[in-house]
Amino acid sequence: MKIKNTFLTGACILAVSALLAACGADDQANEDQMMEMESEEMDHSDMDHSDMDHSGMEMSGSGEVPEGLEEAADPAFEVGSTAIITDAHMPGMEGAEATIVGAYDTVVYTISYDPTTGGERVEDHKWIIHEEIADAQEEPYEEGDEVTVEATHMEGMEGATAEIDSAEQTTVYMVDFTLENGEEVTNHKWVTESELSAE
């Protein structure tokens, strides 16, 4: 009987040990899974700031403007003058001193589109102008309209089908400025009049 009881006790101990080990393994697996999920959330959070919309941004431009774009008759900021950028389309832009290279009267749009190069959809991109839309109609487009983009501000933008998110008749500026990290940006398109302030 003593041997039988010892055997049973030993079997019970082994069973309990195995159960605890399994629970421990499950706990570890759950903990690993939670950490992985948190890591993914952090990565996604980082992407939500500026990486998604501007990782392919062509910061500097050639200085060429689309055909038909008219120079502003009476811009608030004249060509050759300076102003402070008050709204950042990309990190390091807000607060920079901008030199006005060109001023034009047009309709500006924010757009959402799927890049022709693949990747995540770009939402509420600022800005393209009416003259950067392929076969543009004479009248301004409205929110919800679909257009084909001719602008090359970002990789995968040219030729993309975009949805108009907003439209505004205003003066847009092509500007030179220096980012916080010291990188010089020339002929940047576009900054709107409401995104600039006098020094």
Image: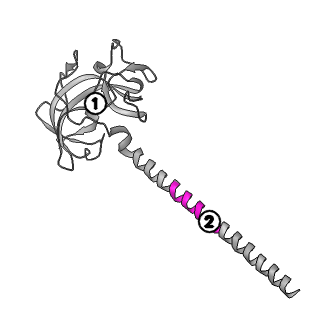
Front residue (pair 110, 15): 15
Residue 190 image point, x, y percent: 25, 31
Which residue is the site of mark 1? 153
Which residue reaches farthest left?
Answer: 80
**Color scheme of the displayed model:** one colour
**From what the image shows, is residue 29 above or below residue 169?**
below
Number of other residues with Cα within 10 Å of mark 2, as a class: few under 14, some 14 to 19, many 20 or more = few
Residue 57 image point, x, y percent: 29, 36
Q: Amino acid at mark 2?
A: Ala
Between the residue at mark 2 and the residue at mark 1, the CA separation in whole angstroms equals 51 Å
Range drawn in magenta: 23-36
Number of other residues with Cα within 10 Å of mark 1, as a class: few under 14, some 14 to 19, many 20 or more = many
Q: Amino acid at mark 1?
A: His
Q: Residue at x 40, y 34 (%)?
A: 122
Q: Tag 1, which secondary structure?
A: loop
Please give left or right for residue 169 compared with residue 64 in the image: right
172 in the magenta segment: no
Residue 80: which quarter of the image? top left
**From what the image shows, is residue 118 above or below residue 198?**
above
In the picture, the disc for residue 25 is 2
Q: Nearer the viewer, mark 2 or mark 1?
A: 2
